[in-house]
Image (cartoon, rainbow, N blue to C red):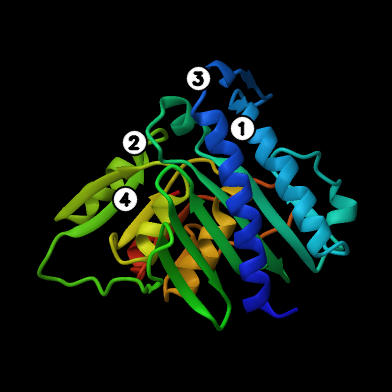
Amino acid sequence: MDLKKTLQQVRDAVAEAGAAILEIYADPERFETEHKTDDSPLTAADLAANRLLVARLQEMTPDIPILSEESKQAPWHERRHWTECWVVDPLDGTREFLKRNDEFTVNVALVRDHRPVLGVVYAPALQKWYFAARHEGAWRQVGSGVLDRIQVADPKADRPWQVVGSRSHNTPQVDAFVEALGRAELVVMGSSLKLCLVADGTADVYPRLGPTSEWDTCAAQAVVEAAGGQVLNVETGEPLTYNARESLLNPHFIACARSRPDWFKRST
């Protein structure tokens, strides 16, 4: 597979999904909301984007299975044999969508041997793109504007740490982590855009010391890593992996430009 060509095909599919989401976003009467078994919200926009993305990915790569938040999951005895898969979150940040603060995204990633090799993150209400492919670099684009190649920041000792945190899912552990950094400035953001702020150098570190699922992080991890950063399990200090175990919940993690040994284990 030519990842550069595939990246553009994925962006085309994601743009369609983004347009479907915005059509519903513009009409509050279509904001019907259900709740899933974990009490997270589900809207018509989640389902519309999912139908479109699954159809487009199946057309592109009929032999590659799809792991999507809004589709029935294959059982582990099948998934454990996958060497490749798509990981999809049709609408990441549904709470931000319902709050109408524009900080929601469409996330699509390609995983090979449990690691993301391609990722697209699109915030349709902001018209902001982040995307990357292995050996092709990481990029940011606003609307149809110029493509900006991005890289993580080089944290300097003479300025406060720039920390990004969750707008809707903050925890006491994160507060303690930020306090332990010493000089730090916190910016809150919704959805996978938090990881993207590390990728483009706006933030130095994003500690996520609370629950997430694999589709929440996979695409943005591809962008962070292609930009020179890391997304690391706080228990092991190793990169997050995907479709590598029966549970689809991520361990707590830290996304960063550069890690420090004292961040790990005690952050769990």
Q: Amino acid at mark 3?
A: Pro
User: How dense is the environment of label 2, judged by Cα within 10 Å: few (below 14), some, or many (20 and up)?
Assistant: few
Give the mark nearer the N terminus: 4 vs 1.
1
The number of discs equals 4
The residue pinned by badge 2 equals 172
The vertical placement of 178 against 262, above or below, is: above
Left or right? Give the position of 23 relative to 180: right
Residue ID at (15%, 71%): 157
* The residue positioned farthest toward the front in the image shown: 144
* The residue positioned farthest toward the bottom in the image shown: 135
The residue pinned by badge 3 equals 28
SS category of the residue bearing label 2? helix
Q: Position of residue 261 (x, y in %)?
A: 36, 68
The vertical placement of 41 against 104, above or below, is: above
SS category of the residue bearing label 4? strand
The residue pinned by badge 4 equals 164
Q: Position of residue 178 (x, y in %)?
A: 26, 49
The residue pinned by badge 1 equals 45
- Compute the Cα span from label 2 to label 3: 34 Å
Q: Nearer the viewer, residue 81 or 245?
A: 81
Q: Nearer the viewer, residue 101 or 92?
A: 101
- Compute the Cα span from label 2 to label 4: 15 Å
Q: Amino acid at mark 1?
A: Ala
Q: Amino acid at mark 2?
A: Pro
Give the mark nearer the N terminus: 3 vs 1.
3
Kindly tell me whether residue 37 is visible in this rendering. yes
Say whether marks 2 and 1 touch (CB < 8 Å). no
- Compute the Cα span from label 4 to label 1: 27 Å
Left or right? Give the position of 266 relative to 86: left
